[in-house]
Image: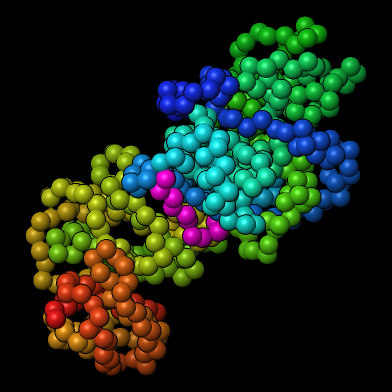
Amino acid sequence: MKNWLIAGLMFFGAVSGSAQSKNLAEGGCATVTTPQEMQMIKDYLSSNFAAQKTTNVVDSVPLSIHIVSKTDGSGRYFLDHLLSVLCDLNTRYAPIGFYFYVRWPIHYINNSSFYDHNYTAGYQMMNQNNVANTANIYFVNDPNGACGYYSPAQGADAIAISKGCAGPNSTTVTHELGHYFGLPHTFFGWENGNIPSNPEKVTRGAGANCSSAGDGFCDTDADYLSARWNCPYTGNKLDQMGVPYHPDSSLYMGYSDDACMSRFSLQQKGAMQFKLTNSRGYLLQSHATGAAVLDTLRMIYPTDTLFLNRRLAVWHKVPGAEYYFVSITSGNSLTPRQDTIVADTTLIIDAPMNYNVKYRITVAPLSSVNVCRATGTKIDFYNTGSTTSVNDLGATAGAIEVFPNPAHQSATIKVMQVPSGNYRISVLNLSGQEVYTQTLQHAGGETSMSIPTAQLANGLYLLRFVGDASNLTQKLIIQH
Ligand SMILES: [Zn+2]
């Protein structure tokens, strides 16, 4: 909980407003469920919805991910943490019957006034960037001084999360999505230091008020704890009838510590399903559910050494992968030297690195329904200041030659011993941008083709030949 406290103090120093500062002192989530949302819970409990929903259909829910940096591009949420959180989300929501999938691409926003925002800027961020018919989540530094909040405001209707509260094993996103699907806190009414006029009694059965007080659910225990607490509860508070209470630390919608939480109650589950069916039906589009298994990724380069003149990573395409997570780390540092999610099977390495030092590159295939990285590959390599004369980085089938090299008006590419199949030839500048591309249906064996280079600026490029059975990279120099 250190993280939200730090975020809170930063907020308190930066923005005036005593109302918000109470959130910081007491909890970390700034969501307060509206009367309309509380009415929905009553509607659910008085309906026969739960009885009707007898099948175990899994509902697919698209998530749009927005990662906010400062205006200069610095400070953003680590993608490693994002993928951990998204992976956990589906384990936690499996009992609810929800399966979250990623609506690509991930959106990157560079805007310091969204990175550390008050509610007004947060509204603008959501209003300007939301993707329709998806659940939108924004990872920022400081969402109005809280760990996170869900804004039900018309034109916003999205979640903001502090990156400091969204590390591996955190429950913040799970909790805020609970709000998004209509759930109040288990301590509803006690937020911001308030004391409700009709506190929920501990007692159930005769004399109980659980359906009209607190969160409105009778299968969540009375809970008055609107500040973070560690489990098990060791306090000795009493309810208004003098009965000792025992808040349930396992519920995601309470404020026990992350490690204490493991579930939603049955009534919470039903209310979320009710909300999805009755007011968020637009999220339900036909989409595959379940984490389709992706093959283990095979690295081509680097394998043990990264050469000065080959500062790139190359790997084999994984069938079904839509994107690849790539991260370069050193030692036990939690801060990646470079982390990205790319569609291509090549990445220019531009991480700052020392020579003759060991680093690790992790590359993992991702699909919209599987971002768990279970079939990723980790390679430890030395970064050297030496160069290599080997042009073909991958020991894959075939070879390509390019000539003349340096090229002027055009370059001829000769493909040799490459199996038949579909291939793509592309030219990348050193920023990794594709400046030319062409597809080829190769009949096998040897073939030649010409690519125009007159429009390309002088400099060093990478020529790539990637496809069904080969993945080759060559250096190409343009000189006019
Ligand atoms: Zn909350």
| Displayed quadrant of residue 260 | top right
What colour scheme was applied to this rendering of the protein?
Answer: rainbow
Residue 105 sits inside the magenta stretch:
yes
At horizontal 89% and vertical 16% (from top left) the residue drawn is 207
Residue 147 appears left or right of 439: right
Count of all numbered marks drawn on residues in the image? 0
In this rendering, does residue 80 appear at all?
Answer: no
Q: Position of residue 10 (x, y in %)?
A: 42, 26
Q: Is residue 236 above or below residue 97?
A: above
Q: Position of residue 315 (x, y in %)?
A: 33, 66
At horizontal 54% and vertical 44% (from top left) the residue drawn is 124
Q: Is residue 25 above or below residue 158?
A: above
Q: Position of residue 247 (x, y in %)?
A: 68, 20
Q: Is residue 416 above or below residue 34?
A: below
In this rendering, does residue 191 appear at all?
Answer: yes
| Displayed quadrant of residue 432 | bottom left
At horizontal 79% and vertical 50% (from top left) the residue drawn is 278
Q: Is residue 343 above or below residue 479?
A: above
Residue 235 sits inside the magenta stretch:
no
Give the farthest residue toward the left: 386
Q: Who is closer to the viewer here, 272 or 94?
A: 272
* Quarter of the image where the C terminus is located: bottom left
Q: Position of residue 440 (x, y in %)?
A: 37, 87
At horizontal 67% and vertical 17% (from top left) the residue drawn is 194
Residue 222 appears left or right of 261: right
Magenta residues (range): 100-111
